[in-house]
Image (tube, rainbow, N blue to C red):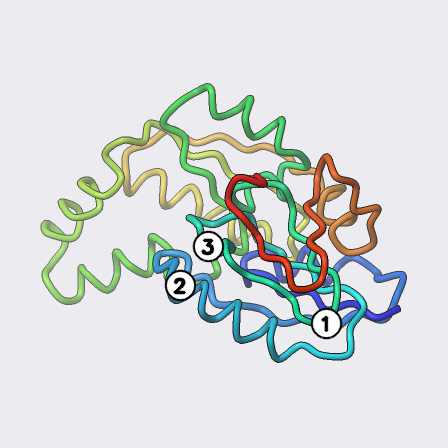
Amino acid sequence: MSIKIIACEVMKEELLSVKPETPTEYSFVSMELHTRPEKLHKELLTIVDDSKGYERIILGFGLCGGAAGGIKAKHCILTIPRIHDCISLFLGSRELFEQLQQSRGTFYLSSGWLESGKSIISEYDRVCGKYGEVKARRVLNAMYDSYRSILFINTGHPREKRCLDASLEVSKLLGLSHSLRHGDTGFINRLVNGPWNTEEFINIPVEEVIKEEMF
């Protein structure tokens, strides 16, 4: 049995830390596409269509703003976590994320997210360099006005300390409170090696498409 995992780059380190029990290949997609679901959808379609010779293709994504809707595999089973975004994967379960969401106004960060090319800090630096500090802060405050706190999820990432410092810098920049929570990589382990049970995963037969109502 051979597997292809197509995942967002924000969980690259966490995924690669899991030892696959079967031959597995990976393709990682840029975090920047998350803000453009239509482009993310097209990218996923292309990679899935080009992935031949596997017995299972696994998407390391949630529904992601509808980007996963309509995706299908032509030659094998297509598996995707039954979640709306990757925060549940870092926390270890969808149920825990739903529980935490009852406290509104939390912005979730992980090391992989902070290392992506479009992090809050890099965006602030870009706007600051172009328009100055005053306007950059005004833009950021408008973008994140609905948030009250930042929760940094510790997943055992190899550069966790540096990323935690960056997370604290973001909280100061936005004037938000900051807290740390240790993640649970069990969900990510199951993403790689199974079991892909129907409570946590959607297993799509050949030529059938992912539908939003499945989530």
Depth check: give the residue in front, 110 or 104: 104
Q: Dot 2 corresponds to which residue? A: 32
Label ID, residue 114: 3
- Residue depicted at 10% across the width and 61% down the height: 131
Label 1 environment density (alpha carbons within 10 Å; few <14, some 14–19, many ≥20): some
Of labels 2 and 1, the one closer to you: 1
Determine the secondary structure under disc 1. Answer: loop
Picture coordinates of residue 74, whole percent (x, y): 66, 70
- Residue depicted at 48% across the width and 60% down the height: 115
Label ID, residue 2: none
- Residue depicted at 35% across the width and 56% down the height: 35
Instruction: Tell me which numbered mark, 3 or 2, is placed earlier along the sequence.
Output: 2
Instruction: Tell me which numbered mark, 2 or 1, is placed earlier along the sequence.
Output: 2
Spatial CA distance of label 3 from label 2 is 12 Å
Instruction: Tell me which numbered mark, 3 or 1, is placed earlier along the sequence.
Output: 1
Specify the amino acid type for callout 2: Glu
Q: Dot 1 corresponds to which residue? A: 75
Spatial CA distance of label 2 from label 1 is 29 Å
In this rendering, the answer to whether 45 lies above or below 176 is below
Picture coordinates of residue 162, whole percent (x, y): 53, 54
In this rendering, the answer to whether 18 lies above or below 26 is above
Determine the secondary structure under disc 3. Answer: helix
Label 2 environment density (alpha carbons within 10 Å; few <14, some 14–19, many ≥20): some
Specify the amino acid type for callout 3: Leu
Q: Are marks 3 and 2 in contact (CB under 8 Å)?
A: no
Of labels 3 and 2, the one closer to you: 2
Depth check: give the residue in front, 34 or 127: 34
